[in-house]
Image (tube, grey):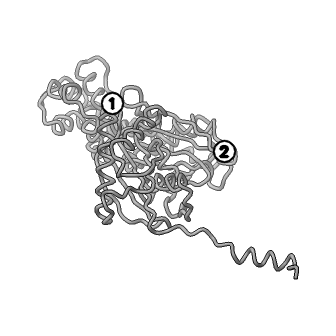
Amino acid sequence: MTKSADQVQEATMSTQVEPQYSEDIRIGGVEGGGTYSTLVILDGKGAKLTEVKGPNTNHWGIGIDETAARLSAMIEKGKQELNIPETVPLDCVGLTLSGCEEEASNRQLVETLLKKYPQSAKDYVIGSDTLGSLRTGLESGGIVLIAGTGSNALLINPDGKTHGCGGWGHMMGDEGGAYWIAHRACKYVFDDIDGLVEAPEPISYVWPAMRSYFNVSDRNGILPYLYANFDKSTIASFAKELAIGCERDDPLCLKLFDEAGQILAKHIIALSKKAHNDLKLAHGGLKVICVGSVWKSWKFMKNGFVNEIHNRSIVDELSLLHLTTTSALGACYLAAEKINCPFVKPYDSNVENFFHYKRDHYPEAQKTEHSVELKNYTSECSNAHAHVRNEETT
C-alpha cells in the first residue's frame, strides 16, 4: 500500500534528531594580554569547566617559541585540573592574543603549537585580543576598545568585515593605554626639570611619586628601567600611582587622564566612519566594549572623552559597555564555531552598560565647568610649580 504524503513526512520527521553535542567535547579559549593571560575551558554545551591564569603571551615581546610554550603550559594545567589525560588534546582552542593582528605570524604560532605540542589541542583559531573581547559581548558587531597595558581598537561590521585603529605597540602607538599614560607623565617631568618644555600642570605630585615608585633619587636612576632593563608592564604599572594622584586632585594627573580620554575617543571616531548604519542606528547607538584596567579610571577620563566625541560631531549616539566576564569566553566561542559546535551564548549577561552618549542630550555646561576647574587648579598651584621646578632630589 502506498503511503500518503503526510505519512511520509511524519515518518521522516520522527527519524530526524536534533544534533546532540557531547559534554565530553572540550573547547578552550585564551585571552592573552601584555601582562597576563587567561584560559577558559568549556564543554560541548557551553558550560564553563575551569579557568587558568598565566603570564604574558604577546609574541612580539617574547618570541613565537616562548609564546607557544606558555600557551601549551596553560592548556596542560587546565587539563590536569579536569583530570584529562596528558595524551588527550582539547578539541579546539581559540587564541585571542595581544599582538596577533598579522596573518603570517599568527599562522606561524599555530604551526609551532601543532608541531611542538600536539597533545595540547587538535586545532586552533587565532586572532587579536580585540576580537576575543568583541565576540564575548556582541553578536552582530560593534567596536571593542582596549586600554590596558597598551591600547587597540577593532570594528566588526555585521557582514563580518573588520577595521582596526591603533594596536601598534609602545613604539608606534598604545595611545590611551597605561604605558602611554605613565610614559607621558615621565616625559612631562623630564622636560620640565630640564627647562625644555614646561609641564602643563605642576609636577609637585608626579615627580616624588616617580622617585618612590622606581626607588630612585634622580632621573638617571630611571634610565635603566627605560633601556637596559626595559619592561613595558613595569612602566605601565606606574599609571596606578597617577590614578591615586587623580583621587587626590593633583592637576597634572587629572590632565593626563583627561588626555587619555580624548585620545581613546579619537579611536572610536576613526572607526565610526567605517561602521555600518545598522550599528549606528541600533537602540543605544554604536556599541563599544571597553576592556582594560585604564577604564577603572573612567571618571577621570570622562570629560576629555565626551568633549572629544561631541566637538568632532561625527558620532550621534553610542553606548560604552564593560564585560562582566573574561574575554577568553569570546575565544571559546570562536573555537566552538571552528568545529561546528553550536550552543547558546549569553551575550546580554556578558556585558553591562556604564555610559550612554546622545548628542542632543549632551550637557554643554560640562565642558565649561571642567575648563574652569582646570584653570582654577592651575592658578592655585602656580606657586608650588615654581618651587618644584629644577629640584631633582627634594
Q: Which of the 4 image quadrants contains residue 150?
A: top left
| Residue occupied by mark 1 | 184
Q: Residue 191 in the image: x percent, y percent? A: 28, 22
- Left or right side of 256 for 261: right
Residue at 22% from the left image edge and 25% from the top image edge = 227
| Residue occupied by mark 2 | 159
Name the N-terminal-most of marks 2 and 1. 2
Front position among marks 2 and 1 = 2
Residue 17 seen from this side: yes
- Classify 10 Å Cα crowding around label 1: few (below 14), some (14-19), many (20 and above): some
Q: Is residue 117 above or below residue 314?
A: below
Q: Residue 393 in the image: x percent, y percent? A: 12, 29
Looking at the rendered structure, the kind of residue marked 2 is Asp
- Classify 10 Å Cα crowding around label 2: few (below 14), some (14-19), many (20 and above): few
- Of residue 311 and residue 15, the one placed in the foreground of this image is 15
Residue 70, label in figure: none
Q: Is residue 118 above or below residue 390?
A: below
Q: CA distance from mark 2 to mark 1?
A: 38 Å
Tell me the quadrant of the picture where the N terminus can be found: bottom right
Looking at the rendered structure, the kind of residue marked 1 is Arg
Q: Residue 72 in the image: x percent, y percent? A: 32, 48
Q: Residue 55 in the image: x percent, y percent? A: 28, 46
